[in-house]
Image: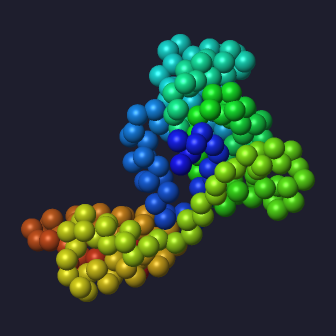
Amino acid sequence: MPKIAGCFVVVYGNSGVGKTNAITEYAKQPNVWLITVRPSSSKLIECLYDIACALDIDYAPKRLGTLSSAICKKMRETKGLLIIDEADHLPYDALEEIRLIQEMTGVGVVLCGNHQIYSKLSGNGSRKTDFARLFSRIAKKVAILNTTAGDIDAIADAWGIDGARERKLVHELGKKSGALRIIKMTLSLAAILANSNNTSINETHINAAIRDLEGI
């Protein structure tokens, strides 16, 4: 939707429910650019520089105005999509600059992060702050709060988990905080244990991995 419509979309939710994996996969499409905001790169100039790098702008200008103009020139007429992960780290001036870039170029923008990004854009519910101009431009918000059985089954399939007891264990992991991340870490360790025994992952390996990761 955001790529076609050239609008703002906010994707937010709990940790470990697959947001980053989903947008990373989507970013493999043409004219889709993905950046991840780190605390060390959350300032406006650093954020714009990361966008310029994602756009393959050679010798990105160091002055804010020139850099923003170069980004707009590169994006214009592309009908592309800019995805910003960990967007909850961005301050107001960076979000406002991204809003203006979106309006000037017509590209779609997805802001992805935890619940703080939506709270920030909505003025923590008041909508009477400087963020009102940003909030009014959100065409769609997507809250991803929990994993689905389909997500968990897809991971189990990818790891070759076929047994009923093994899959039940994996689904139990899916109920924990950071579900998909926990499943991946557990199955990665279980695979190491299974490989050392020249066998496929079974219930014993998964339980051993759970105990090890939980420090039991």
Residue at position x 33%, y 82% from top? 169
Outermost residue, bottom direction? 165
Q: In this rendering, is residue 105 above or below 61? A: below
Residue 3 visible in this rendered orientation of the protein: yes
Residue at position x 37%, y 72% from top? 150
Compare residues 145 and 86 and report the one nearer the observer.
145
Quarter of image, res 156: bottom left
Compare residues 153 and 193 and report the one nearer the observer.
153
Outermost residue, right direction? 128
Outermost residue, left direction? 198
Disc count in the image? 0
Q: Quick check: 163 left or right of 111?
A: left
Residue at position x 78%, y 41% from top? 92
Q: In this rendering, is residue 140 above or below 153? A: above
Q: Quick check: 209 left or right of 200?
A: right
User: Residue 82, how many percent across, how many down?
Assistant: 55, 37
Display colour scheme = rainbow
Q: In this rendering, is residue 148 above or below 84? A: below
User: Residue 36, how many percent across, how many down?
Assistant: 54, 42
Outermost residue, front direction? 5
User: Residue 74, how many percent across, how many down?
Assistant: 55, 21
Residue at position x 46%, y 60% from top? 18
User: Residue 132, how many percent across, how many down?
Assistant: 83, 48
- Which quadrant is the C terminus positioned in? bottom left
Quarter of image, res 119: bottom right
Residue 46 visible in this rendered orientation of the protein: no
